[in-house]
Amino acid sequence: MSRTVAILLARLIFAGAFAMAAVFKFAGMEQTAVYIAAAGFPFPLFLAWLAAIFEVGLVAAFLTGAFFSEAALLAGAYVIFLAFAFHGPALWQANQAEFGFFVDHFTFFAGLLFAAVHGPGEKLAMGLGLIWKRGTASGN
């Protein structure tokens, strides 16, 4: 029972983190676009919308367990991209806090990798996916 609770709590935490990110983007899409443009990316408003929609998809996958491992891997790639794009080494000289933000992304990435390997658990999981299937711990 404690394993199930831990897995469901982890899924809720992942979903909550990405839900908050999406809500902030939707609530301030223009500000998000300005932040993206400041990092040097083209089409910042389009990328802001794309990021928000992607995060909503991640929330759905973490809450339902559908395509959970795939979503966790994609989320991991996204988190590492964000670490380098918005908190990378070029920013550490001007603001040492950026190094902390950068490292935090890697701890989140580690959790997402662990989740991808172990799947969404047996409870409240749709069991849909290419990697993890209901009844297997790692999709093997």
Image (cartoon, rainbow, N blue to C red):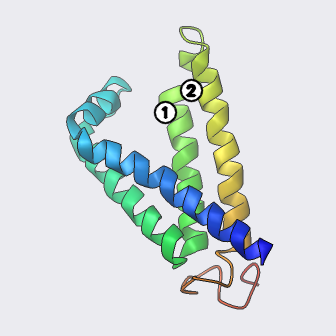
Q: Quadrant of residue 44?
A: top left
Which residue is rendered at x = 64% and y = 25% of the image? Answer: 100
Front position in the image: 51 or 125: 125
Residues at marks 1 and 2 touching, judged by CB atoms closer than 8 Å: yes
Determine which residue is flagged by label 1. Answer: 85
What residue occupies the far bottom of the structure in this picture? Answer: 135
Give me the C-alpha separation between circle 1 and circle 2.
6 Å
Q: Quadrant of residue 130?
A: bottom right
Instruction: Where is residue 124? Give x, y as percent.
Output: 57, 82
Determine which residue is flagged by label 2. Answer: 88
* Residue 2 disc label: none
Which residue is rendered at x = 25% and y = 38% of the image? Answer: 28
What residue occupies the far top of the structure in this picture? Answer: 94
Front position in the image: 92 or 108: 108
Residue type, numbered disc 2: Gly
Vertical side of 107 occupied by 111: above or below: below
Residue type, numbered disc 1: Ala
Say what secondary structure mark 2 lies in: loop
Task: Decide if residue 89 is in sight here.
Answer: no
